Image (cartoon, rainbow, N blue to C red):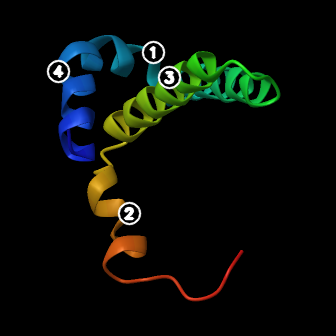
Amino acid sequence: MEIREFQQWIRDRYEQRDRERGTPGTFLWFIEEVGELATALAGTDQANKAEEFADVLAWLCTLANINEVDLEQAIEKYTIKGVDGFK
């Protein structure tokens, strides 16, 4: 599945509820999932790590959707345009 397809899949299933929650509420859910990922990364349970990575990606797609950002287009700064140097 391509990133755009997954973002659309999330939109098709959750968009109305996500838009009602809005960006601030959705961002809080996203940050909670990032915290759960941080905890998982400190452990050794690979299945839990994979689950938390998936949750973070799903909530990132949700944030992008309600803010009208096409993630596949956004990552072109890395894939097509290229990024010089390191952060």
CA gap, disc 4 to disc 3? 17 Å
Three-letter amino acid code at disc 3? Asp
Q: Is residue 24 above or below residue 45?
A: below
CA gap, disc 1 to disc 2? 26 Å
Contact between marks 3 and 1 (CB within 8 A): the answer is no
At horizontal 25% and vertical 34% (from top left) the residue drawn is 6
Q: Which residue is mark 1?
A: 21
Residue 34 screen position, x and y as percent: 67, 30
Quadrant in which residue 58 is drawn: top left
Does residue 49 appear to the left or right of 39 in the view shown? left
CA gap, disc 4 to disc 1? 16 Å
Which mark is on residue 55? 3
Local packing at callout 3 (Cα closer than 10 Å; few below 14, some 14-19, many 20+) is: some
N-terminal-most mark, 4 or 3: 4
> 77 or 1: nearer the eye?
1
N-terminal-most mark, 4 or 1: 4
Local packing at callout 2 (Cα closer than 10 Å; few below 14, some 14-19, many 20+) is: few
Q: Which residue is mark 4?
A: 12
At horizontal 80% and vertical 23% (from top left) the residue drawn is 43
Name the residue at the top extreme.
17
Which of the two discs, 4 and 1, sits closer to the camera? 4
> 84 or 26: nearer the eye?
84
Q: Is residue 51 above or below residue 4?
A: above
